[in-house]
Every structure is written in C-alpha cells, then in structure tokens.
Amino acid sequence: MPAPNTTEIAARSRAIANAHAHREGPLLPILHEVQASFGHVPQEALPEIADVLNLSRAEVYGVMSFYHDFRDAPAGRHVVKICRAEACQAKGGDALSERARAALGLDWGETSTDGAVTLEPVYCLGLCSCAPAAMVDGQLRARLDEQAMDDLIAEVRP
Amino acid sequence: MKDFIIPDADFGTPASRSKAMVSLTIDGHRVTVPEGTSVMRAAAEAGVKVPKLCATDSVQAFGSCRLCLVEIEGRKGTPASCTTPVAPGMSVQTQTAKLAKLRRGVMELYISDHPLDCLTCAANGDCELQDMAGTVGLRDVRYEQGENHFVTRQNGEANPRYIKADTSNPYFIYDPEKCIVCSRCVRACEEVQGTFALTIEGRGFDSRVASGMGEDFLSSECVSCGACVQACPTATLQEKSIHEMGQPDHSVVTTCAYCGVGCSFKAEMKGDQLVRMVPYKDGKANRGHSCVKGRFAYGYANHTDRILNPMIRDTIDQPWREVSWDEALSFTATRLRDIQARYGVSAIGGITSSRCTNEETFLVQKLIRAVFGNNNVDTCARVCHSPTGYGLKTTFGTSAGTQDFDSVEDTDVAVIIGANPTDGHPVFASRLKKRLRAGAKLIVIDPRRIDLVRSPHIEAAHHLALTPGTNVAVLTALAHVIVTEGLVNTDFVTQRCDIDAFNEWAAFVSDPRHSPEATEILTGVPAQELRGAARLYATGGNGAIYYGLGVTEHSQGSTTVMAIANLAMATGNIGRPGVGVNPLRGQNNVQGSCDMGSFPHELPGYRHVHDDATREIFQTMWGVAISPEPGLRIPNMLDAAVDGTFRGIYIQGEDILQSDPNTKHVAAGLKAMDCVIVHDLFLNETANYAHVFLPGSTFLEKDGTFTNAERRINMVRQVMAPRNGMADWEVTQALANALGAGWTYTHPSQIMDEVSATTPSFKNVNYDLIDRDGSVQWPCDDAAPQGTPIMHVDGFVRGKGNFVITEYVATDERTGPRFPLLLTTGRILSQYNVGAQTRRTDNVVWHDQDVLEIHPHDAEQRGVREGDWVRLASRSGETTLRAVITDRVAPGVVYTTFHHPDTQANVVTSDYSDWATNCPEYKVTAVQVSPSNGPSDWQEDYADQASRSRRILPAAE
C-alpha cells in the first residue's frame, strides 16, 4: 500500500478531528484514531487537528509529544515492548533486554531496516508479580526467561 | 525618574478581584487580602518573600517548582503557597527547618541539570535561579554528573540531549541548556499574549520548551512580543542586546512612540546606551505587556540613515548642502517671509506631527497661528481619525474615546469594526483576547477575515464580512434590528439623550429599506447573521465598540462614526466600565496632536477659531492677533500649491508623500512650492521635494508627553542627549525665533503649563501631577482633579446625547469593467505606518515588502500565482508588487499595506474623501490586477528621482 500523500493525510485527519470535535476532551480520541488510521501520527495531521479544535499547533504538538505511544513515524510490522521498570529489573529483566537487543540487532526505539520489528522500552506493564514482562503487538507476555525471549523473537523475526 | 535598576515587585500570582476580604497570619504577621488570593501573594503583600521559580504575577499559579512550599497549621504536609488560596484564620509558616531542607533539595535537583557558568552567563546579575540558590543556601550538589542537557560532548561523543541555542529571532535567543522547564514562557505566551505559540514537548527529563511544532522561533507563530523573555527566570530566553552589552545599570520610565495604545516602558540604560526596553508593570495602558515594535524595534534611533545636521538647497534638483543651524534657520526665515511678502500672509502653513509630543505639537500650531499669522495648520489625523473628532463631537460632545483600556476587563460583548488590533494595536488585542477567553463574546465587522475572527481559543460569534464602503448601511441595519425588535434601552435614551432626535432617528432606521434583508444585496452580509449580531450587542451585557481606520477612511467616515455612537446610545452602552465607543488611534500621539489644536478650524481643546472668547485667551497669552478664519486643510494646501497661491510649508515628523492619498498629486503640490521644510529623523519621501531639512530627535532624546487612545497623558522622558543637538521643540522654537517670535521656553513643562492655562480640559494637568500619578486622563479640571478614566458617566459632555440620521450614500469610487476589484489597505504587526522607523530595524525579517492579498478565485481568473509580480492599477495610478493568494479576503476584494516606499500603495488610492472632514477614502479603491514582469515605469522613475534627490554634498571645509 503506498504511503498516503500530504493532501490525503490532511483530509483524513480533518475528517477524524471533525468526527470527534463535539466530545468533551476530544484531542486524545482524535490522536488515537489518527494513529489507528495511519499507523502513526503524521506531522501534517497536527495543524488540521489544531484548526478544527481551534487550538494552536504548539498545543497539539505538546500533547502528542507527551505520550510515548503516539508515534511520529510508522512502526515496524511487529512492535516489541520490553519492561525496564524496577520489578522486572529485579527479576533479571536487564539481561533479557540485552539478549533481545542483540538478537534483533536493534537499539531502543529503533525499527529494523526491513520494517519487520520495532523495539521499545516500556516502564511498567502492571505485571510486576509475573516479572519480567513484555508486550508483543499489544499482547502481554509474562514470566519471561531466555527461552521464552528467544521464542518471542523468533515469532516476530521468523 | 532616573532609577537604578530595581526589579518591579513580583507578587507571584495575579491579584484577586474579589470584594470579600480574608484575614490570616503569615510568620506571625496579620494580613488581610481579597478572597481568592494565594498564600504566596498574601505573604508578598505582607513583605514576606517566599522562594519561588515557576510563579510570577503575570500568569496563573502552576505549582511545579515546589520551592514555595509552606507549612499551614492544622494541615498535613507542605502545600505550595502559589496554588493554595488563603482561608480565614489560617496560620502560615514560610520558614522552618523542614522547609529549608526541602527547598535545598529541590534546588539541588534543579542545579544538577543546569550549567554552572554563572560568570559568563548573559543573565548574570539578573537570574532568579541564581537568586534562589542564594536564598535557600545551596552549598553543595551531591549528584554526580550524569545525563544532562548542557554539556556538548560526553564520554567523547556528542551529547544527544544538548540542543544548540535558537538564534533565529532577531531580538532574543532561546538557549535550551539553561532551561529549568518552569513553563513561565509557555504560560506567558498563552495567558498574557494569547498567541499559544509555545509548548513543552516530550515528558519527564526529555521536556523542553518548543515553539510551534518544534521548528525555530522565527518560523513558528511567535509574534516576538517579548512576554516569554520577560517571564523567563533564567538566561534561556534572553534579549540579544543583553548578550552583547551586559546588564543595564539604571532605567527611565517613558512611553512608547509607536501606536495609540501608548505603552509605558522602562528604558534600561548603561550610561547613555539603551540596553533594552522593558514593558513597565505599572503602565496603566499596557499593564506590563508589549509588542514587537515597542519592545524591540528602537534600533532606528542609531541607524546610519539618520540625518544629524541641518541641510538646505535652493532647488530640489540640487544636492543637499550641510549647513549650521543658524544658516539653515535664517535661510528658512528669509524664504518664508519673502513668500508672505509676495503672495500674502496665508501663502504658507504647516503640519504638526502625531509622532511628536503634545508640547511640540502645541508649539508648531502656535508658530503657525502666532508667527506665520494664519490658521493653515493641519495634522496627519486629517488622513486617519478626523471623522472621529467630528462624529463623536456631534453626538457626545467630545472628540475622544469614552473608556480606558482597563474597561475591556468588564466587557461582555466586544464589537470590532474596521480595525485589526492583533496587528495594529497588539497590546490592546492581547488584553481583549484575555477577556474573550474568559467568556466575553465578539462581533467583527470587517471585509477581511482578520485574526480575531478565529485564532486559537478565540472565535467571533459573528463576522459581518461586508463589501468595502458599506459600513453605514450595515450599522444602520443593526440599528434597524435593535429598534424594530424592541431592544432599545428606553430608560437610558429618555434620561440621557435628546428624545426628539432619538424619535426622528428611530423612525428613520425603522424604515424597511434599512432592514438587513433589504440591504443584504448591497452589503454582502447575510441578514440572519446581522440580526444575530444586533441582538447580541443589544442584549449580551456590557457592549463595547472598538473601531479603527476601516471606519473613518471612507467618503462616509464621519457618518459611520455617528452611526456607531447612535448604536451605543440606543443600547445604553455608555458611561460605565466595560462599554463605550473607542477609536483605536493609529499613532502614539494622534489624540494629543488633535487636542493641541492641530486642525485649521480649532484652537487647543477643540474650540473653533470663530469663537471670540477662545481667541481672546490666546491673544492675551501670546500678545498677537489670531485670525478668526479657519485655515487650509492638507488637501486644500496641496490644491492651492498646484494653483500657485500656497508656496511654503513646515512639516514636522510626517511623510505626506507616502502616507497621503494620490501620491502624484501630493508630489505635484510639493514641487510647486518655494519652501518645503521637512523636520524629520530621516530623508523621508517628502524630503525629496524639500528645500530645508531640519534634523529631528527621537522619543528617547526628549522630554514631553504623549496622549494615547484612552486620553491618557503619559510622560516621555529623555534617556539620552539628542544626537542632532536639539529636541524637536527646541528646533521649532529656534525657527520661531528666527522669524522674530522671541520665545524663551527652557523646558517642555513650561509649554504644558501654557496648555493648561489656556485649555479647560487640561486645567489641572502639569508635570508634577503626571510624575506623581504616572499618567492622567483628560478632562482633568476642578471637577475631575485626578482625570477622567471613563467619560459621560452622569451625562454627556454636550448635555443630551444626540442621535444623527445616517443615510447611506454609496461612494463615487465604483467598480466597473476596467476596475472590477475593490482595494482596501491596512497594517501588519511588524511594520509601522510608512515604515520610516520599523524598516530601519530588524523587523524587516517579518515583512520586507508590501504584498497584495488576493482571493484564489480572482487570482485564477487572472492567471496569477503565489509570489507572482502583479500590476495593481486604479483610475489614479498603478504600481507593482507580489501577490499572496489567500481566502482571508473575499472574492472581489484585494488588500495591501503601505509600509514600503518602493511600492507606494497610495499611488493607486483615489482623491475621494469624507464629506465632513476630507479624511481620504483609503479603504475603497476600484482596481484591476494583472500579471506583470516587475516594477512599473512610475516606480522606476520614482526610485531614480528619490536617489537623485537624496544626494548630499560633502561639507565645505
């Protein structure tokens, strides 16, 4: 599928913004839907959203950049998030993280050149009792060990 | 008032407007403050300083720095004093061992991500972070250097968190390494300025201030008002002048010389060098805010183009000769007296300046009336607000706005007619926008979709996008709705107004031919929209009308002003805070120049020269006879010059060639004269036709007063010696004395004393009063010894308010097959008037040429693309400029500015003018637009003539 051009992004973002404009606190629902629609929040969408809500571009940019889950560039086909917070660290998360980075050849926040995988850190998935934890394409994985991590990587990078 | 720099008191959070009072104790001191006041502010009012970083009293409390923690008896923990409101009987401790430890810990964290380069930092000596480190007694930072935002290289590699300083703005630097992320700049941009150009990007340790969507300041929406720089507690946002020159050591409070808002500034100095202009918190017009012009665009005072020596020449095709003051003045005096001997006493005249002080203007009109011996004096108000003078005098009895600027804080419905405050009167616009964000409604009547119609957090309830030239029809239709729908404030009208005049007017406007439905085809304003606007203004609470030159600069300018006054009276929107009729005056002292008797028919205080009693006052004071015949207006002077009967003119601080309509006619008039004296800072366009050039002084170089749009007389104080050797009032006096007047003023205060001795509305005005109170609004007499913030409170100045019939008469300037489009003109933010000053500052980065705004539909029909050169032609003349395609203008309307002499928009404008006052019809000209290759023949000829005319011979030794 070819990437949408600037005019198309503007038109679709505007339509999404208009659809939510009546809501109380419409900005986050709009950003979510824009991300669902394009796989990320394109820079060109922000002025359209700002105009519909009569906010400044800076305000929309400030909100969007605050949330790590709103991406400014498309992610890989699979997104692996590994928890790096305290409980997971205590249960050997650091070593597992290193293993994942080495196996994928990616640093935090990077996407593989073939567009297959994006690796991201996350600070607590709420699974401290089953640490170490990770999330693959929105699905939670817990009680990871080396084998489980290797399996996980094989899944996203067959 | 030459003070050493003492920072203005900062109470931390804004004042509460509550009437209910609350008492509490802070560190044992009993304090009583209005309900809603923060503990921090209450403490400051009691003289107790609570340490703070993220709080400043121009913006709402934010509670992020955690330095202002206090302990409150009976409450848990250590609440932030900025976000905690006072409560009755509260007992607060601001200094305890626990608090000291917490504060030191907070400071330690701040400093762990801040460079310790205080000695070489631009804010050294003026840094709140430095002050707070001292206040809390920070002695040690225990954190090892880890990740940070300030080292450029770490472990041999570039530090990815380090962001280079953004120097794109010509006046200030944004240096992220110094930032403590207190958000004061972001909040100032939002709350004070209302532009919302800044944000905090990212979160946590990644948080940084960003302009727009992370682009540089210059490319963002930033309007360079300086509010963020003012709010910044560190060197993160800092004037470039401070980087270059260091901290100032003393300051002088003075008044801005740009628009009619009349902001007060502290000129911060180092010796006789101006380091920066800082908006003065106690300034009653601006309340501590500023715009890009007043705050930063003062560099013209030292521009190399400035002429510092007098110059003369026999004819205008000769180069200039620099001469001594004596030679220049005797040359001038001889020429003027020769003209009068040959062509009569009335063959010479003069133009006062709306850029100069009241005292200087008073002297120029005195020179003309008492020394020239005629009343041939006029001023640039002729071409801007003369209809305001006429219209408001006829209806209310006085030629001035009714309110002070503070009044907008009580407005519920603001109506903006023919004005673009965000560009023309930016500080007022910010105050209005603040009120609009708090819930007031807005009606905009303007052919263009100006920024106030819709911009972040502001949206007009109604935008009546009328066809240029149909103001009267629209306002009469509004009156029709108010009268026929029974929305008239009958109590007000019966008690306060001339009831016969009202009845006649009400019958007139009720005629169905004035209904919005009947006039829709003519005005282009949908009837339902207009009805909605009328209902809102009449019933929405306090309704205030603010208007600009889009009202006055029409063939029916005076009629429109009276139509506005009619609306305000019919709805009872006069005589209290939040209402009124407010002309947004263009120039810093245009109100003052009118007050000082600059019109050919009026002596100071708007008293007709026919009036024997008034003339007698001046004749006694001046010891000469004053002609009872009104003199010539500017256009009449030029007509008479072309006819050969008017041959000499003294023009102080005005560039009539560029600013007045029909440039070719102005040029012909000037060319026909024998003695044109230009008294100005620069060789302006008019000087191309001058025989004598007298160098002028800037507002920084003289004492005096300016009167702003709210009738406020503000002090102008000399901060440096005049570079040309004499203040403008001294030059006028020297010219008068060369003509034998024998004047002996030694200070402008003596001139003001003469004004108050002769003019009833200035009776109690003197420099001592202005020094003491900071400023005073006329009328200031025995009835109102402190001045008059709001006029017509108990009754109109003329007695009963007068309703005037406002029949719409279409202008003779019509579109037709050859000239199918309507041109209207205006201003933009960064440039000022003819641009003589702002073009000589870095403000040109925002606007380096005049452009033509044209609707996409009209552009496409003509094959005009964005940025193309286009030829703009009218029945008067033509010029070329570049096109900008935008739907801010309606189809059929084009728009440009008049800031640049190489475009000369006024070559195109017509000779038509207001029926009552001759104010030119700049706002409506029938034009055609077509693609072009470049400058017109006229522009090339003009440029050639101008460069020849500006030659200066080296001084003869």
Image (tube, coloured by chain):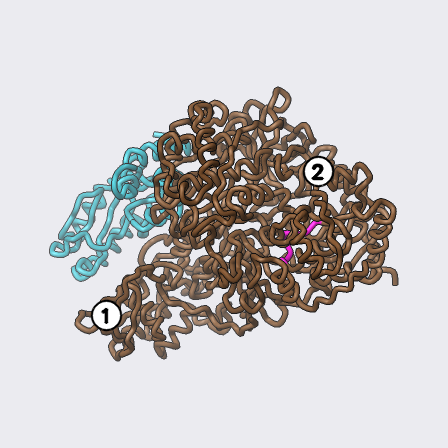
What numbered label is drawn on residue A9?
none
Earlier sequence position, callout 2 versus callout 1: 1
Which of these two is toward me, B496 or B749?
A: B496
Region rendered in magenta: B351-358
Q: Are labels 2 and 1 on one chain?
A: yes
Q: What is the quadrant of the C terminus of chain B in the image?
A: bottom right
User: CA–CA distance between discs 2 and 1?
Assistant: 69 Å
Residue B497 is situated, as x and y percent measured from the top left of the image, at 45, 42
Q: Is residue B564 left or right of residue B182?
A: right
Residue B100 is situated, as x and y percent measured from the top left of the image, at 29, 77
The residue depicted at 82 percent of the width and 39 percent of the height is B644
Chain label for disc 2:
B
In the image, farthest residue toward the left:
A129
**Which dot, 2 or 1, sits closer to the camera?**
2
Which of these two is toward me, B579 or B40?
A: B579
Query: At label 2, which amino acid type do we have?
Result: Thr
From the rendered image, report the letter of the chain displayed in brown.
Answer: B
Residue occupied by mark 2: B663
Q: Colour of chain A?
A: cyan
What numbered label is drawn on residue B78?
1
Main secondary structure type of the part rendered in magenta = loop
Secondary structure found at label 2: helix
Q: What is the quadrant of the N terminus of chain B in the image?
A: bottom right
In the image, farthest residue toward the top:
B817
Q: Relative to B900, does residue B783 appear above or below in the rendering?
A: below
Which of these two is toward me, A88 or B814?
A: B814
Residue B356 located within the stretch drawn in magenta: yes
Asked whether the viewer can see residue B653, the reply is yes
Question: Number of marks in the image?
Answer: 2
